[in-house]
Image (spheres, rainbow, N blue to C red):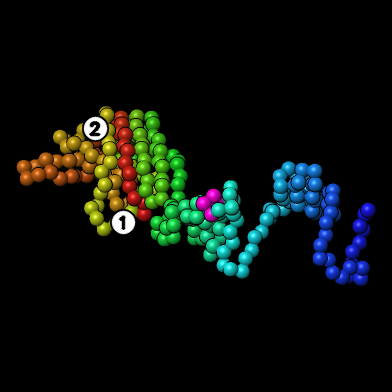
């Protein structure tokens, strides 16, 4: 029997309704597949106990008046078997075995194991490349200059290779420094951070051993010469005029805190 219309004049109270066979509401607005015991919303051929299909971006909305909304995925009726997805104060919280494991914070960033502090949230991960060049240099021909970095939060790990094949003499002397992918922090500590360095050819630095130091409150790694006087050792900046060869080759690797 087809039931074509129910309105307030023909039906005032419905306490129980038992049906057999399929239930179709407006073709696929709601469809109950009694053969496979599946329910479809927006589809007349559901392939799971509940399938929602829509042509718009909003497929499911869960609201609550208690300040948070939980979606439970459980393999048993006990809380020990639960995986819970919670919307709480604009945060997205992932819970397993009754304990919070991860939180996507409302202001951005991910925190773990119940930590709700925004300062502790991991807010960035990226890998990339940049083009390292000698700063303030003119007339430079590069045979190779490539830099690679991995940035996790505010920590940047980098490696670079710079090799020149020609370098015309610019006017004046300037410090030898290579650009970095991100600005260096300005924490009030020592002014430099050391990094692993390898200098192969083209270096003439008047008996000073070259070292590469990351300069804070900048965006460069600078080449210094380490001098060993009788009273100890110190660093002196190496100027462009101290380098006599047009063919320079340097490899650097280091880690620093981003500003």
| Residue in view at x 9 percent, y 42 percent | 229
Q: Secondary structure at mark 2?
A: loop
Residue 37: percent from left, percent from top: 76, 46
| Residue in view at x 24 percent, y 52 percent | 191
149 with respect to 80 (left or right): left
What's the distance in space between the residues labelled 2 and 1, CA to CA? 31 Å
* Circle 1 crowding by C-alpha within 10 Å: few under 14, some 14–19, many from 20: some
87 with respect to 203 (left or right): right
Residue 65: percent from left, percent from top: 61, 69
Q: Nearer the viewer, mark 2 or mark 1?
A: 1
Q: Earlier in the sequence, mark 2 or mark 1?
A: 1
Q: Quadrant of the C terminus?
A: bottom left
Residue 34: percent from left, percent from top: 80, 47
Q: Is residue 81 magenta?
A: yes
**Residue hosting label 2:** 203
Front one among 38 and 75 = 75
Front one among 56 and 210 = 56
| Residue in view at x 41 percent, y 50 percent | 153
Q: Is residue 59 magenta?
A: no
In the image, which residues are magenta? 79-83
Whether label 2 touches label 1, CB < 8 Å: no
Q: Name the quadrant containing residue 88.
A: bottom right
Say above or below: 116 vs 204.
Answer: below
161 with respect to 75 (left or right): left
Say above or below: 8 vs 227.
Answer: below
Front one among 56 and 52 = 52
Front one among 186 and 72 = 72
**Residue hosting label 1:** 186
């Amino acid at each position: 029997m087809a039931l074509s219309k129910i309105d307030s004049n023909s039906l005032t109270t419905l306490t129980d309704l038992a049906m057999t066979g399929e239930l179709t509401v407006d073709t696929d607005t709601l469809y109950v597949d009694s053969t496979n015991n599946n329910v479809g919303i927006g589809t007349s051929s559901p392939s799971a106990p509940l399938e929602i299909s829509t042509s718009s971006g909003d497929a499911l909305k869960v609201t609550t008046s208690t300040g948070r909304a939980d979606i439970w995925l459980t393999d048993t009726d006990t809380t020990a078997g639960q995986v819970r997805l919670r919307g709480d104060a604009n945060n997205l919280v992932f819970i397993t075995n009754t304990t919070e494991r991860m939180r996507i914070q409302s202001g951005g960033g991910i925190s773990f194991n119940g930590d709700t502090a925004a300062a502790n949230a991991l807010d960035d991960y990226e890998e990339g490349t940049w083009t390292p060049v000698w700063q303030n240099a003119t007339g430079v021909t590069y045979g190779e200059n490539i830099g690679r970095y991995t940035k996790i939060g505010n920590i940047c790990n980098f490696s670079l290779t710079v090799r020149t094949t020609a370098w015309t003499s610019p006017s004046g002397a300037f410090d030898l420094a290579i650009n970095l992918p991100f600005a260096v922090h300005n924490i009030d500590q020592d002014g430099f951070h050391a990094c692993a360095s390898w200098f192969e050819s083209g270096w003439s630095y008047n008996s000073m051993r070259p070292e590469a130091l990351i300069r804070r409150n900048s965006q460069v790694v600078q080449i210094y010469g380490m001098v060993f006087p009788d009273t100890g050792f110190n660093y002196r900046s190496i100027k462009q005029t101290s380098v006599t060869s047009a063919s320079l080759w340097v490899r650097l690797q280091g880690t620093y805190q981003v500003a």
